[in-house]
Image (cartoon, rainbow, N blue to C red):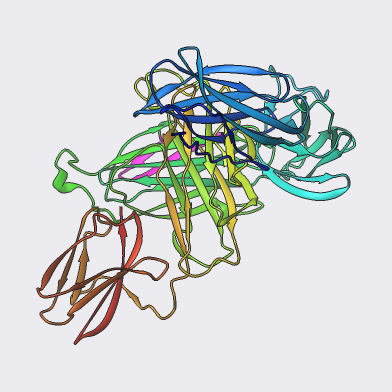
Amino acid sequence: MKKKIYYSLLALGSMLCCSNLSTAQTITGHSVVYPNQCGGVTMHITTTYTASQQIETSWGDMATTTVNVYDTLGNGDAYAYHSYVYPGTYTIKHVLIQNSQRIDSVTYSYDDPHCQTAGFYNYYDANNNCVYDSAVDTYSPVASTFAIDSAGVPIDTITVTSGFYYYMYGPTGTVYKFTPINVPPGALVSCPAIGYTTVTVQAPQNVYTEEYFGYTCSGITSFDLAANVTVSTGRHHAKASVLVTNNYCNGQNATLTMHFSPKYDFQYAMPAPTTVNGNTLTWDITNLSLLTPGYITADFEVPNSQNQANWLLPGDTVHSSYYLTPTANDTDTVNNVVIHEDTVISSYDPNYKEVSPEGDIAPGTELTYTLHFENTGNDTATNIYILDTLSDNLVASTLDIVASSATMIFSMNKTLSGLNVAKFDFPNINLPDSANNKPCTGMVVFKIKTRASLPPGTYVPNSAGIYFDDNEAVQTNTAVNMIAIPQSVNILSNNADLIVYPNPTNDVLTIKMNAQAYSTLEIKNTHGQVILQQTLKQNDTKVNVKALPSGIYFATLKGDAGSKTIKFEKL
């Protein structure tokens, strides 16, 4: 009996054609995987695995490659890469080879678009010669906004710090124009002299172009101090990270004052504080300018943390505040003050993502995400990059970079399956390892809008993978928002008559109530679907929620006391 070949090609114009060989060893699937922007395409091929398998791929342009098949939990995995010189529709054929015998094949068409990559870099041109010189010039640490048009039609705006990669699509000869339209107030665009640059799409699509935008100081002697703050709080450990900037070239001495929650004790900071008074810390920062930002981290621990009974509980709130002075003559004092409220998570992880505002939001809300990373290995990380696959509920074109702790190049990639993947690249960051050095952390902050048409109860999740050199990705937590709880649902907090705990929970939810106040329980997900129903017969009722997927749920209790709904999180 001939074995059926299954496939899941994420490309246009797919068609399947199989060999007539009869065998239990087959190609079971193939798909396009990231990355595939301008520089080539990678195909993931799966098989029913036995030892000594290979995949031979004919790419349709007279090129052929052969790769080994590897065992992944009993399944065969192979990755075949190819870069096309010219765009077009190609017929790709994968052949499964076992001990030099060709035993199965799959053929399909693949549409490779006309695409060319250009890199754009923003730097301070110290000697004003319009040539980037790493010995004297500095990549911009402050965000600028660029307008992009194609063939004279505006198509995009992008806000970045040090630079970005852009993928240009269109027929040969299509002209793309890149214009800085919003730069820091203390800077002027000096290069190119005409104030913009153009790139023309060429016939061979593997051509890479680099363009540079040079800045010089405007000569204005004002200053604008600003603080970007992120806080991570665990049950026994917490960390605060502060990026301090000045949007003008004129050097300004400043003082950062941090008031951290008394639920923790101060441990150490980099750089060391100027003064420490309990959990009030100050840093005197000299010569803060557009070119010389400051990056401060401080670590805290609950008192007597060796005793787990002293640890905080998940869901506890932690407050901290941050003040930059002087404010006299500062052109914008609003960004001098940050008041932060954070929710304790189950455990502290230095590689994590946070979102502001948290929790329930309205459709169209602009969210601010912060990605934190720490080199927890045993050697310096030379290059770090972050891949953030954006939810379809976010508008990718509205992503703007707010700040980054080091030189960072941004790009937005789109997979053939339609997913938007934001890439934050920190080349030559040379981040020390945490085993022997401090600080060993970094961050990037960006803003992005949610879709205005999202219905109530819609989740907006976001997580990312952090890559340290050639190591496997370190996956962050998932930061989750939800659109507008239905107005008909009255969400209550725990009170004396009704307590639901622990919240968040991993497996069992305990409901403590007055006798006979409520007789039934109904749990719904954020889409309003009833997930679980249960009769309440005791003052303390245990509800097994271990099988529920992680997320937000609503527990509604009904009885003689009426109806009450409490929101809880399943971890």
Look at 59% across and 41% down and name the residue there.
10
Report if residue 63 lies within the magenta region.
no
Q: Quadrant of residue 111?
A: top right
Principal secondary structure, stretch drawn in magenta: strand
Rendered residue at 62%/41% (across/down): 416
Point 67% across, 35% down: residue = 109
In the rendered image, residue 285 lying in the magenta stretch gets the answer yes
Image coordinates of residue 245 in percent, x first then y, are: 59, 41
Query: Is the residue 378 above or below the residue 329 in the image?
Result: above
Which residue, as the protein is rendered here, is positioned at the far front? Answer: 1
Query: Can residue 102 be seen from the camera position used here?
Result: yes
Front in this rendered view, residue 149 or 46: 46
Q: Is residue 329 visible?
A: no
In the image, 153: left or right of 71? Answer: right
Would residue 562 be found to the left or right of residue 367 on screen?
Answer: left
Q: Position of residue 151 (x, y in %)?
A: 88, 44
Q: Which image quadrant is residue 491 in?
A: bottom left
Position of residue 464 relative to residue 139, above or below, is: below
- Number of numbered labels in the structure image: 0
Q: Which residues are magenta?
A: 273-286
Q: Residue at x 54, y 29 (%)?
A: 20
Q: Nearer the viewer, residue 180 or 177?
A: 177
Residue sitting at the far top: 100
